[in-house]
Amino acid sequence: MSNKVYIFDTTLRDGEQVPGCQLNTIEKIEVAKQLEKLGVDIIEAGFPVSSPGDFNSVVEISKAVSNPTICALTRAVKKDIEVAADALKFAKRGRIHTGIGTSFYHINYKLNSNPEEIIKRAVEAVKYARNFVDDVEFYAEDAGRTDNEYLARVVEAVIAAGATTINIPDTTGYCLPHEYGEKIAYLMNNVPNVDKAILSTHCHNDLGMATANSISGVLNGARQVEVTVNGIGERAGNTSLEEVAMAIKSHKDLDLETGINSQEIIKSSRLVSTLMRMPVQPNKAIVGRNAFAHSSGIHQDGVLKNRENYEIIDPAEVGVKESSIVLTARSGRAALKHRLQVLGYDFEPAELDEVYQRFLDLADKKKDITDEDLQILAGRGQEQKNKPLQLELLQVICGKSTVPTATVQVSFNGDVFTETAAGNGPIDAAFTAVKALVKRRVRLEEFLIQAITRGSDDLGKVHVQVEHQGQTYYGFAAHTDIITASVEAFLDAVGKIA
């Protein structure tokens, strides 16, 4: 049996069924191109008969990408299949994905039919689809709750009719991993012509076991996994692409592989999250904000000594630059010392002990300790006057129906320079002016504003992180005017570039 596991991505079909997550054609093309970079084998681009928009999206995605197979979903209905075939006419490799419900519930309550009639309709649909494409996938909807013996009869019949891939969906997310794995094993052992097709998993996450079920299916003979980026999809979602890809990559002993370029995972996750306006939960495996973050002192010390003490995946493998050491009351001296060194401070042991005690006092009052807090703790918070770039003047014009414009005047070694620029907002305009003044190609990586206390007259702290020629630089500032604080923080970071 082949050790290649094909990745079938249905973010643009099943994933887009989430309420409020619909994309237009241009956005779908952007996601499809990123999925191609990610290395997915099949992109399920839509359900063409459902709407003109879905039809057009399948057409345009077929034109926009070259490497993945483009798949279109249908019911076991001739009209659906004809429309799907028409939508796939520009695909370099097209696949029609047709099927019908096979569980007792679907046969009796959804389709008002009987088992023999369902097999007949399934065979007719596959044969009709083969008139248009050579690559036909059949789905046995609600296979997770379908009797194994009857499911084997259906699978044998549709393979004989010409299906090249057989999708075994746990449509309701009901199965336990051992049950789903046993179902795949039963088909592998009891369908005589199973070697003529690839079995595919399609698992929903209603009980939180979509990834576990999919991996169990693969271990028992499935060689295609149907997934979505960030695990989005109907109800509680689908099997997560990133979880399956990294589970297989991390377990070398399985002797399995996918074609996924794992370094594109974070980029893909953020694109889908942004376009679909669906935030990723912080503790989401692989792509969550906290997936590589450590706040426990014991964990922080272990990670700083050797990453593999607490991380089974190198963050760089999925596109994250480095692990995050989050300072809280549970952090130890090792984490505090590490963060201070990142900020440019190096203390003798006795000095570090004093700073650590002040750190603990503050950490008991605040949830998280910021870099500005550490500057104050270190007694270095008044360094603004010694910074190489000093903000002398800042004037911004902004408002509704007005192009945001900023004039920035900066002094450097006794000389004063002035620049004016426009931008998407006052801060963007001011940052653009600063970049023109210093003549550096810098990219803003992180921009955070935090109130110190409460109220509209509060002092705002700003933390920025910029990248220049592969190096990262940090800047900090505080002011009652957040635009001024933002520009001073940006100048602080840029001023550290040699």
Image (cartoon, rainbow, N blue to C red):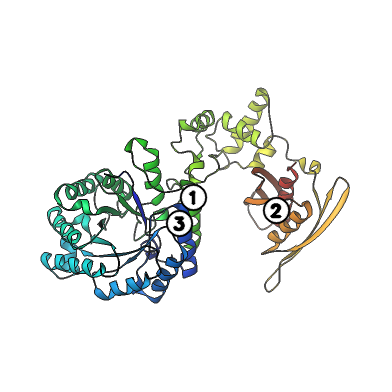
Q: Is residue 445 visible?
A: yes
Q: Residue at x 31, y 55 (%)?
A: 204
Which image quarter holds the C terminus? top right
The amino acid on which the numbered mark 2 sits, given as a three-letter code, is: Ser
- Residue denoted by label 1: 264
Q: Is residue 130 left or right of residue 258?
A: left
Where residue 159 sits in the image (x, y, percent)? 20, 59
Q: Are marks 2 and 3 in contact (CB under 8 Å)?
A: no
Where residue 65 sits in the image (x, y, percent)? 45, 62
- Residue denoted by label 3: 36
Q: Residue at x 74, y 54 (%)?
A: 435
In three-dimensional space, the C-alpha distance between marks 1 and 3, rounded to whole angstroms, equals 10 Å
In three-dimensional space, the C-alpha distance between marks 1 and 2, rounded to whole angstroms, equals 31 Å
In three-dimensional space, the C-alpha distance between marks 2 and 3, rounded to whole angstroms, equals 37 Å
The picture quadrant where one finds residue 231 is: bottom left
Where residue 313 sits in the image (x, y, percent)? 45, 38
Q: Is residue 240 left or right of residue 156?
A: right
In the image, 231 versus 278, the foreground residue is 231
Residue 45 is labelled as none
Say what secondary structure mark 2 lies in.
Answer: helix
Q: Is residue 277 visible?
A: no
Q: Is residue 160 left or right of residue 72?
A: left
Residue 175 vs 16, above or below: the answer is above
The amino acid on which the numbered mark 3 sits, given as a three-letter code, is: Glu
Mark 3 burial class by Cα count in 10 Å: few <14, some 14-19, many 20+: many
Residue 45 vs 498, above or below: the answer is below
Count numbered badges in the picture. 3
- Residue denoted by label 2: 486
Where residue 254 sits in the image (x, y, percent)? 32, 38
In the image, 343 versus 363, the foreground residue is 343
Q: Is residue 341 left or right of residue 206?
A: right
Judge depth for marks 1 and 2 and give the one in front.
1
